[in-house]
Image (cartoon, helix red, strand yellow):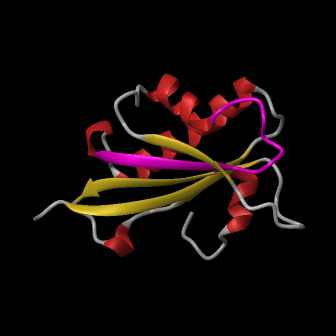
């Protein structure tokens, strides 16, 4: 079966804006996303992170680099849109990876309070 390029979405909400909390939650999000989808580090093409405006203590990409040894994977951070009433303290990710899974088989990951962002997904 050919390996296909797929995209995986996910999010997590932090409880306090500290470098340790950002790192812990990013690590948990990525480990769960990789485990659910059978993704090895060498399968990953790139990861885009966004964070809400209230997260100012650390870069999610730095946490991924340090905690999951993703130093040779292109990682990028950006700001999430500042929409009134949106859930605060949210870090989102979009990972591109190679897999044999069909698009409908990709299991997106929304942890903790972030699960309210996409209740339509099997999380």
**Outermost residue toward the left?**
1
Q: What's the residue at 71%, 24% (across, down)?
A: 20
Position of residue 59 measured from the top left corner of the image (x, y, whole percent):
64, 33
Q: Per the image, is 53 magenta? A: yes
92 in relation to 30, above or below: below
Position of residue 72 measured from the top left corner of the image (x, y, whole percent):
34, 30
Placement of the N terminus among the 4 image quadrants: bottom left
Q: Nearer the viewer, residue 58 or 11?
A: 58
Q: What are the residue bounds of the magenta stretch?
A: 44-59
Q: Is residue 47 left or right of residue 121?
A: left
Q: Is residue 58 left or right of residue 94?
A: right
Position of residue 7 measured from the top left corner of the image (x, y, whole percent):
40, 62
Q: Nearer the viewer, residue 66 or 38?
A: 66
Residue 5 lies in quadrant: bottom left
Placement of the C terminus among the 4 image quadrants: bottom right
Q: Per the image, is 78 magenta? A: no
Q: What's the residue at 39%, 47% (across, down)?
A: 46
């Amino acid at each position: 079966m050919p390996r296909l390029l797929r995209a995986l979405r996910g999010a997590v909400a932090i409880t306090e804006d500290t470098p340790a909390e950002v790192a812990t939650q990013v690590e948990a999000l990525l480990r769960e996303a990789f485990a659910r989808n059978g993704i090895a580090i060498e399968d990953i093409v790139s990861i885009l992170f966004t964070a809400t405006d209230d997260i100012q203590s650390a870069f999610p990409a730095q946490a991924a680099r340090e905690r999951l040894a993703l130093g040779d994977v292109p990682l990028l951070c950006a700001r999430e849109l500042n929409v009134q009433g949106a859930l605060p303290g949210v870090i989102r990710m979009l990972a591109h990876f190679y897999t044999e899974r069909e698009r409908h088989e990709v299991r997106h990951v929304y942890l903790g309070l972030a699960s309210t962002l996409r209740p339509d997904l099997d999380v």
